[in-house]
Amino acid sequence: MALTDLQLMAHLFRRAGFGAPRDELEAAMARGYEATVETLLHPETAPEVEEDLLQRYYIDAKESFQLDGAQVGWVYRMVTTQRPLEEKMTLFWHGLFATGFNKCDDPRVITKQINMFRRHGLGSFRELLVELSRDPAMIYWLDNNQSRGDAPNENYGRELLELFSMGIGNYSEDDVKASARAFTGWTLAPTLPRQPYGRFDWEFEYRPELHDDSVKTFLGETGPWNGEDIVNLIVKQPSAARFIARHLYNFFVADEPQVPAWATVPPRDPEAINVLVDAYMTSGYDMRSVMRTLFMSDFFRSEQAYFAKVKNPTELVIGTVRLTKDFGFLRQGLRELSLECRYMGQDLLNPPSVEGWHTGKEWIDTGCLVERINFAAQQVADVRKPGVRLIVDRLQVAGPLAPERFVDMTLDLAGPVRVRPSTRQALIDHVTPGGELRFDDSAAGAAGQRVSELLQLIVATREYQLN
Amino acid sequence: MADKTINGKAPKLVVLQLTGANDYLNTVVPYTNPLYYDNRPNMRIPAEQVQPIDDTLGFNPNMQAVKRLYDEGKVAIIHSIGYPNPNYSHFRSMDIWYTCEPEKVSSEGWLGKVVRDLDPKGDNVLTAVNFGRGLPRALSLSGVPVASVAQLDTYGVLTSLSGATRSMAMETFLRMYSGTEGGDEVLRYMGQTGLDAQKGADILRSAADTYVSTVKYPEGNPIAASLRGVAQTKFADLGTRLFYTAHGSFDTHASQMPMHAKLWKEVDGAIDAFFQDLREHNASEDTIMLIWTEFGRRVKENGSGTDHGAGGVAFVIGEHVKGGQYGAFPSLRNEDLTQQREGMFGNLRYSYDFRGLYSTIVDRWLGLDGSAIVGGKFEQLAFV
């Protein structure tokens, strides 16, 4: 069964951003799907987030040495941005090039990296990998500042191939060594140690005297390769195209098995991967082109992709907040949002390791599911929030509503959220003892409470956990 | 099966994972071996700081409680542990330890299988409890419930509602999570997880309420907080047999000396409080603790740290553990280290397969069939 225009638009906003309340979806539908995709692909056409406003309410959000402030800054952007794909791509690259506060110890340096993803996330993959290799947080995270021509440190040279661009099985240990040698001299300035001098505004520095400029053989090609040559040799590999295509599919289309299984488990939709690989190659590694292909593709706009992903914690937290239109007027409380992401297993700017987060079904265990349900229910419980008010108002205009219609309309306005027949029946049976939903003068308060309670149950469903 | 008891009590296992690869050589230090000092001109523990075990090996100075327990004969040191064809990726190596599958990628955790065998019908959703965020793959097995808690006292769903409203909502919640039509695997998994969460929640919340102890766990020490949760749950007698927790990151490519010291200080303080607590509650006899890490670190230092290695060290601690050293400390001679053709030059060789350690615990401590769980017969040790 083909998806309706409304379902499709909600799907697009959930994937290319963090979802949208009904009035925003309707405005986008008036513009049309393709035009909406183009707007998403060109963040520069929408206003920037107002950072000044953030700093008025959160004085430590920018220059803090604590993780909290930096997380608040990013959560604020995700909640308020009018450039949703820009933020979503940034989250995608953060998961793929996972760099953690736990080692870097300075959130400013990680925020710098996030800002770099924001600038380059929809540009050339080649440039992105060069920027990544020059990124101070990455250099420190994977110890490239310890790598010298006479003693190359293999950490970055290896992970660049294994985790960031090609995947295991597509290169040899000798390629790792060549890659590590080529990136010697790509280091940080100043080089003063952390102890006892504290934190610095690190900058990238290339130091020729630390670089091994001898001839190396990398992926079968021989020359006096430097780091940028390594990137150039990587990005043209079919294995790199497939690796990025599969990551994009896994993040934007439908859940794949965990990354380590990719060497042996074929993609869920090999044809879709081929389409993305082609877009990558023919566009010269241009991510905007690849994303356009993805969002306009049949596989994205189909039943097989619809709710075919488990929401990651950030999608669940930000998506729920955007549905309720909270923080339209800035206030305290953003810190709680970033903490919720942590409790649900996604500590932003601080992934568990360089491998990033396990995704899909692995977001769900008893502890995390409890956190997800309780957070979302808490958010939608308050009928004074503009987004919840919007739902109540629409129900009121349509009322009085018999139990079935009450449930169906609320499910529709809260997403649309598509639930199984048994879930729907449980919800209908739940509201049936209360009879029709009526907003007569005497019953208005009670009706609001009934909507609040039903919304809490809807976000507690299994189906709401899907994106 | 699973009827084995220790003085009438069911045996329990606490697993503590040192995430990120703990450096073997600076944990159990070969303080009289000149090759140690040759390879570690800076990343070394000076001989006078080592806590000697014998005339060749000694504990890291931060492992004071471990040393004390060792002197009491309660700590087994498992030397040179690893697996064939060492993998140098954290992710992959952890998965190998989690699943006992060095060859292929598997999603079935060995402890998930232990839970299944301890409680084949899934009668108790609290047979295994993980303390921390997210479940390690060691505990994951389709159809096997494992409670995962961050904090005991705030555990349960739909806490935004209260009273009669919540009771009715909970009924609806249970119905919504019980539907099985459609056969979607992820929704089915979520359904089971939701039902398990609900079952376990009320019981677990009470564990924190009933706990009384004079033992002070170190403040600001996350692994101590986790082990306190283990103790609370254990004392509440909920039928929990398996407790899991982790600490890290031990991935000391750089700044190893201060980092490694801090991490072991935290782990050691947590172990100290935990075993004191067990003894205070007369509850130490039925419990052993396994401490493991995904691999050791390179013999030769590199700048201010060490790179990924191969052979490592594990520990088993408990009242009923026959303390001492098991297996041989590895040779540090160049020709005895792993060679380039094996993927990496300069790592300690493993001489004991971790699956033997697991099967020792599964067979001899838990009374289950170890070879079925680890996938084959491996040399067992006599520490229990």
Image: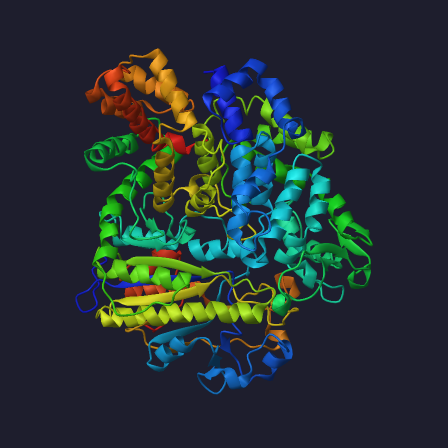
Residue A223 placed where, x, y %? Answer: 82, 52
* A111 up-or-down from A384: above or below: below
Q: Nearer the viewer, residue A406 or A177?
A: A406
Residue B348 in sight: no
Residue B172 placed where, x, y %? Answer: 25, 30
The colour style of the image is rainbow
The quadrant where residue A273 appears: top right
Considering the image in quadrants, where does the N terminus of chain A appear? top left
What residue do we see at 61% from left, 23% from top?
A: A37
Q: Nearer the viewer, residue B303 or B348?
A: B303
Q: How many callouts does the rendering have?
A: 0
Residue A195 placed where, x, y %? Answer: 61, 68
Residue A11 in sight: yes
* A88 up-or-down from B100: above or below: above
Kindly give the residue lying farthest to the front in the view shown. A56
* B228 up-or-down from A256: above or below: below
* A398 up-or-down from B223: above or below: above
Could you tell whether B326 is left or right of A72 in the image? left
Kindly give the residue lying farthest to the left in the view shown. B8
What residue do we see at 62% from left, 76% from top?
A: B40
Residue B159 placed where, x, y %? Answer: 29, 40
